[in-house]
Image: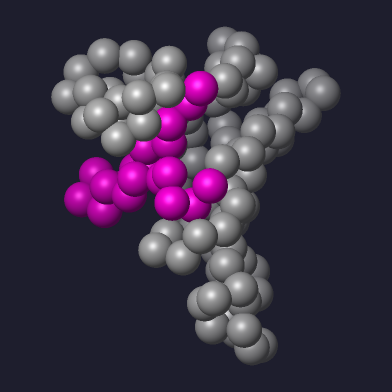
Amino acid sequence: MQYEGPGTIVMINAQPVSIVNTWGSYVNINEAGNYLLIPAAGMRSIEHDFATDNTVVLTMGSKAVEGTVGPGAGFHVHGTGEFIEAGAEFDAMQAKFPWIRKVLKVNIKEIQQKI
């Protein structure tokens, strides 16, 4: 996540599918807890979808990272999400990103390198 690139968050079970985007540099990684924290200014479509299914897939990558077949690496992150709007983690993220309304917390189940 140290190299800038887009990140896409997909609600794969939503009908229709909901998709939102962010930047890799916005994502905070908690390795010990195995989750990601992502600032949310909008993301209302996926927040609404969480009422029935909170399964998410994130796609992330950067051409600045060596991949499996040359320059560029991409990843799929599978997990479940929840929105937080209070507490120490929210406060820390809001200090970095004062424009947020909530924080998307993604509990990681699996990471796959695609290229």
Above or below, 108 relative to 40: below
Question: Which percent across, then down, holds residue 65?
Answer: 52, 77
Q: Residue at x 43, y 44 (%)?
A: 26
| Residue placed furthest toward the bottom | 70
Q: Which span of residues is magenta-colored?
A: 23-41
Q: Residue at x 49, y 41 (%)?
A: 79
Above or below, 86 relative to 62: above
Question: Which percent across, then down, holds residue 104?
Answer: 44, 28
Q: Quadrant of the C terminus?
A: bottom right
Residue 5 seen in render? yes
Color scheme of the displayed model: one colour
Quarter location, residue 37: top left
Q: Residue at x 56, y 41 (%)?
A: 22
Q: Residue at x 60, y 16 (%)?
A: 44
Above or below, 33 relative to 105: below
| Residue placed furthest toward the front | 98
Residue 78 seen in render? no
Q: Is residue 106 left or right of residue 29?
A: right
Question: Which percent across, then down, holds residue 48?
Answer: 61, 12
